[in-house]
Amino acid sequence: MTVFEVWAPEKNVRLVVDGQEHEMEAADGGWWRLELPAGTDYGFLLPDQDKPLPDPRSPWQPDGVHGLSRVYDHDAFTWTDQAWTGRQLPGSVLYELHIGTFTPEGTFDAAIEKLDHLVDLGVDLVELLPVNAFNGTYNWGYDGVCWYAPHEAYGGPDGLKRFVDAAHAKGLGVVLDVVYNHFGPSGAYAPMFAPYLSAGSNTWGSSLNLDGPDSDTVRRYIADSVLMWLRDYHVDGLRLDAVHALHDEGAVHLLEMLAAEVESLSAHVRRPLTLIAESDLNDAKLITPREGGGYGLHAQWDDDVHHALHALLTGERQGYYGDFGSLDCLRTVLEGAFFHAGTWSSFRGRRHGRPVDRQRTAGHRFVAFLQNHDQIGNRAIGDRLTAILSPGLLKVGATLLLTSPFTPMLFMGEEWAASSPWQFFTSHPEPELAAAVQTGRRREFARHGWAEADVPDPQDPATFERSKLDWSEPGKPGHAEILELYKKLIAVRRSVPDLTDPWLHDVEVWHGDQHVVIRRGSYVVAANLAGVEQTVSVRSPARSVLLATEPGVVVQRDRLVLPAESAVVVAVR
């Protein structure tokens, strides 16, 4: 028997299954239910519609977000990961990738074939950009509308399960990026059934109804999606997109509710389950345990670390980089996670953030990165650091990131200095929506000083194709050297306890003219950002050099002579 149900208060709902129409039965709380002996493709008819609409909780959309839903049996998949015990976030290295551009084929199965590369690199957790169903064939994924259904072009529900199962077999955990702050502009049928949306809005569209009338069921809709990914797809964590856009004035914030329910599920499945927030708030309350009065999330993205490194290495100061770029700024974020911590933000025109308690808040709770999908893809031409920095400074940046007290995250291809850009691409089939996206993107960048003619057309298939990784590069000169450095850096980080120690109060940073030194227990990381050789004081006698990004480092007791644009990891007394 198959139970069909949908939440649609104050509406009469009929069910269409395999072309046959059925009256549904009203249940408590605005729900409609019907149990049938069988069923495959189905949809719901609302009073004002002549076409069946997909299920807001659809597990499978084989014909896209505008098509009928399909019944899916989670118990039918044969898992082989029974021995999997998970991966905890502390000590791990994350790797962010987009299924559609990670391989030429752009599918879960094709990505499986590249997992050995990630194992050899040394990463622990693979973070997938959103894979739930969205409008069109390819997209970044942040305009998803079916929050329970993996995108069919990637391989659908079974494809995602095959990927997770294969990753676990190779010792890799999987994190999914999920978006619960808005629905995409096309295919969002859930609000036609019930009050999923509030009167408010955010940057991307109407806000979710998290604290108004009928919000209990909306919150349940989100929580059940969260639990489904972790339980039914065996994923190890979720990255929650832009949680600052979740407007919730209830006594128990949605994020705290999710943290509590995920903790319960983790106890049941007996493996770590991680919730990582993307937040613009610079407020450690999100990652403070619930016992300490926080929301209880496990980590959050730390854009301040990115901005400090990016502005320092590139010299860029436009937009939100305006306050960043000094060595003092780098010292502040390496020692205290946030740069804006109750301080003036010129970009916002106000004070922003609050300080992190270095004694109580561990650095692993902050996910740090040199590059990610946003920081590359939201540049006009999607250019990576490869196109901006010298090889020497690329290596310096990698060293500072991978020896930091934070949880480092790499963006696909970064490890070999990929030359392919990662641009903003869409494939909306509706001409009006496509034109709106094209025009809006160009106007947005024009306001930031880029010529409209330089902005790639998001709807042009060539924009999508350009953004795919070139897997012939890792073995080529220049790229292979960077890849080898990333492998060595991750290996050193993993082998030296002082470099995985997340406690911020044990980090000490000092700097001089275009150089910086970070003390991590019995080890020192020193970087020369200048285009000439420099002598740098490490304040303690050096014992041995563990890693150097360039040859020619000279040890002079408590001083190091560093080649131009180089970094070194040294054991000290």
Image (spheres, grey):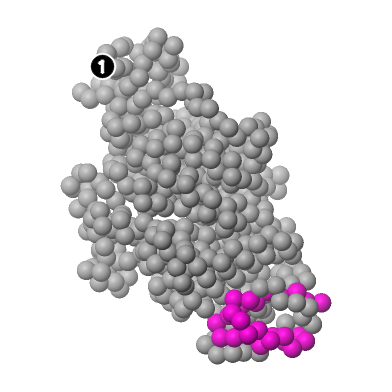
**Depth check: 98 or 487 in front?**
487
Q: Give x and y (percent) for residue 375.
A: 43, 63
Magenta stretch encompasses residue 554: yes
Identified at 25% across, 69% down, the residue is: 454
* SS for callout 1: loop
Determine which residue is flagged by label 1: 19
> Which residue appears farthest toward the right when viewing the image?
573
The 10 Å Cα crowd at callout 1, few under 14, some 14 to 19, many 20 or more, is few
Magenta stretch encompasses residue 451: no
**Depth check: 519 or 475 in front?**
475
Identified at 73% across, 63% down, the residue is: 496
In the rendered image, is residue 346 in sight? no
Q: Is residue 300 above or below residue 306?
A: above
Relative placement, left or right, of 492 versus 318 is: right
Identity of the amino acid at label 1? Answer: Gly
- Label count reads 1
Q: Give x and y (percent) for residue 289.
A: 67, 47
Q: Give x and y (percent) for residue 210.
A: 47, 38
In the rendered image, is residue 491 in sight? yes
Q: Is residue 471 above or below residue 225?
A: below
Identified at 59% across, 79% down, the residue is: 550
Relative placement, left or right, of 10 versus 302 is: left
Q: Is residue 125 above or below residue 561?
A: above
Q: Which residues are magenta?
A: 548-573
**Depth check: 288 or 301 in front?**
301
Q: Quadrant of the N terminus?
A: top left
Q: Quadrant of residue 18?
A: top left
Q: Give x and y (percent) for residue 430.
A: 20, 44
Identified at 52% across, 71% down, the residue is: 481
> Which residue appears farthest toward the top when viewing the image?
37
